């Protein structure tokens, strides 16, 4: 069973707007022959000088950043700085930052609208977030405070600039960190103008500017007014976009520095004052601001977002990966010459059997260490580095083109359903349901668990029977098409398939009929 890549799929369905945008996670840079020659010449002459000078200025920023916080305790840094530290160091960093972007080719920053005061809008939200050059928006905003990963503190120069900025730091490895960030954002946003404004990129990751990703609620938790800021790069050649699939960091940096002049448009929209309902519901607040900004940009607002390291879309009541890891596993196994249908897994229904990487290799008859490690990495491991062999059995069955969807759903149910008691029927509980959807569709486990709870509300039990599971996975008008699109070999997602997961995002299209229907 072959699968199409996200770049081959048709446009994602928007949640607003009359037409669908291209996949916002993919950026393809198409250069004409003349543009290639021009980029090669300027890349060889102009880019090295610009990048070198920009790095020199970047390191010159360090003394100003260090001086502002030198000698201050952690307690003193919990309050906004005043006096000479703010005046001298702030102006020094602001001036050098503008010089840094100027040297990289951003000769013009065109500003429209008027920036609100910190009393009018304690929070600024900027979009679309499409490149690592987007911090240029800090300059017309007079260096507001930002939210950043705590890990960035260890990066040379960048760490010093974050301390200078008194940035709000979040650790992805500490669950309590997010709660502290929420409290700190609320404390600063409700300080009555004591703190400078806080700047958020609410999409949380970079896209290709063709659509707005789903806004995360962090910027809206305080329930205070926000000022939306639009960022545009109206250049004839888009060298700045840095999406999930597309040119890497060095290529984007080099090609942008090779352009004679890059222009940035920064537009301040009117302050958005939340309603009482929006103040109580950050998600509603975020969705409404997203729609306002999308309308001003003339692009759709979507439900696309990043969960972990993969982009997902919303189909019905479920989040699914644009490119499930199951497909990548299939590519790895077929490259090794393994046909999943010929593997005798022998997994026991309803019983977990944890296996090591060595046993995994023996079971699948794989000998190449790199292939074994690559295939084994696709499965969730426990604290001892073992994987549940039922996961392996279901994945191999899904990759076997000889099974139809009904057989596959029965197998999935048998593997993960549990007995209620002696002599009673078996039910599929939350963990098993989440595992099945994560393996087959790439659904994040929390999203699958939420859907399981909704499906169980219709019955007296906290588990699903086989009939209920198949009603969802085979007979549901939308989710049935989703399973068919992801798992049926005759319905591979590609540019001509209206039944692709992307096109199913709002449930308005029909999957193509199979031969014999």
Image: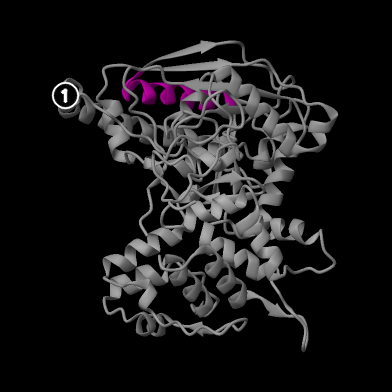
Location of residue 60 in the rendering, given as x and y in whole percent from the top left corner: 38, 32
Say left or right for 185 vs 54: right
Q: Image height check: is 130 above or below 474?
A: above
The secondary element bearing badge 1 is classed as: helix
At 77% from the left edge and 81% from the top edge, which residue is drawn?
420
- Name the one closer to the observer, 446 or 494: 494
- Name the one closer to the observer, 392 or 158: 392
Tell me the chief SS of the magenta region: helix
Say left or right for 1 vs 265: left
Quadrant location, the N terminus: bottom left
- Name the one closer to the observer, 357 or 424: 424
Q: Image height check: is 481 above or below 187?
A: below
* In magenta segment, residue 102: yes
Task: Kindly identify which residue carries mark 1.
Answer: 33
Location of residue 500 in the rendering, given as x and y in whole percent from the top left corner: 48, 44
The answer to whether any part of residue 119 appears in the image is yes
At 37% from the left edge and 26% from the top edge, which residue is drawn?
100
Say left or right for 398 vs 370: right
The residues colored magenta run 86-106
* In magenta segment, residue 465: no
Say left or right for 224 vs 405: right
Count of residue discs:
1
Question: Quarter-wise, where is residue 219 in the image?
Answer: top right
* Residue at the front extreme of this rendering: 516
The answer to whether any part of residue 82 appears in the image is no
Q: How is the image coloured?
A: one colour
Label 1: few (<14), some or many (≥20) within 10 Å?
few
Location of residue 401 in the rendering, given as x and y in whole percent from the top left corner: 40, 65
- Name the one closer to the observer, 373 or 429: 429
At 41% from the left edge and 25% from the top edge, which residue is drawn?
96
């Amino acid at each position: 069973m072959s699968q199409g890549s996200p770049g081959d799929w048709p446009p994602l369905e928007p949640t607003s707007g009359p037409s669908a945008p291209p996949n916002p996670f993919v950026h393809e840079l198409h250069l004409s022959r003349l543009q290639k020659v021009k980029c090669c010449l300027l890349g060889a002459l102009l880019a090295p000088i610009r990048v070198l000078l920009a790095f020199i200025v970047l390191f010159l920023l360090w003394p100003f950043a260090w001086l502002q916080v030198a000698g201050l305790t952690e307690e003193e840094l919990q309050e906004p700085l005043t006096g000479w530290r703010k005046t001298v160091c702030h102006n020094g960093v602001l001036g050098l930052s503008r010089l840094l972007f100027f040297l990289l080719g951003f000769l013009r920053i065109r500003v429209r609208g008027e920036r609100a005061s910190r009393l009018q809008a304690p929070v600024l939200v900027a979009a679309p977030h499409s490149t690592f050059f987007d911090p240029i928006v800090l300059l017309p905003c007079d260096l507001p405070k930002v939210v950043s990963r705590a890990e960035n503190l260890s990066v040379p120069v960048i760490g010093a600039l974050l301390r200078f900025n008194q940035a709000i730091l979040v650790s992805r490895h500490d669950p309590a960190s997010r709660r502290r960030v929420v409290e700190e954002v609320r404390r600063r946003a409700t300080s009555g103008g004591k703190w400078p404004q806080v700047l958020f990129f609410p999409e949380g990751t970079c896209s290709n500017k063709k659509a707005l990703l789903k806004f995360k609620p962090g910027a809206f938790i305080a329930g205070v007014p926000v000022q939306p800021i639009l960022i545009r790069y109206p250049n004839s050649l888009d060298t700045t976009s840095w999406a999930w699939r597309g040119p890497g960091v060095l290529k984007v940096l080099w090609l942008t520095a090779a352009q004679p002049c890059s222009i940035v448009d920064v537009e301040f929209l009117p302050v958005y004052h939340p309603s009482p309902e929006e103040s109580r519901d950050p998600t509603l607040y975020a969705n409404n601001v997203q729609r306002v900004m999308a309308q001003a940009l003339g692009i759709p607002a979507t439900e696309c977002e990043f969960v972990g390291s993969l982009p997902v879309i919303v189909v019905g009541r479920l989040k699914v990966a644009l490119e499930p890891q199951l497909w990548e596993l299939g590519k790895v196994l077929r490259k090794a010459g393994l046909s999943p249908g010929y593997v005798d897994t022998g997994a026991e229904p309803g019983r977990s059997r944890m296996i090591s990487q060595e046993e995994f290799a023996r079971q699948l008859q794989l000998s190449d260490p790199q292939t074994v490690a690559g295939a084994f990495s696709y499965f969730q491991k426990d604290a001892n580095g073992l994987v549940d062999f039922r996961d392996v059995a279901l994945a191999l069955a899904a990759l076997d083109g000889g099974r139809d969807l009904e057989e596959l759903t029965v197998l999935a149910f048998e593997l993960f359903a549990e007995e209620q008691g002696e002599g009673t029927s078996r039910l599929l509980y939350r963990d098993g349901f989440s595992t099945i959807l994560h393996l087959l569709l790439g659904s994040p486990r929390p999203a699958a668990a939420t859907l399981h709870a909704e499906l169980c509300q219709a019955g007296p039990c906290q588990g699903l029977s086989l009939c209920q599971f198949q009603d969802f996975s085979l007979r549901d008008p939308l989710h049935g098409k989703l399973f068919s699109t992801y798992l049926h070999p005759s319905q591979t997602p590609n540019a001509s398939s209206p039944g692709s997961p992307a096109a199913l995002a709002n449930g308005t299209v029909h999957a193509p009929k199979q031969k014999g229907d």
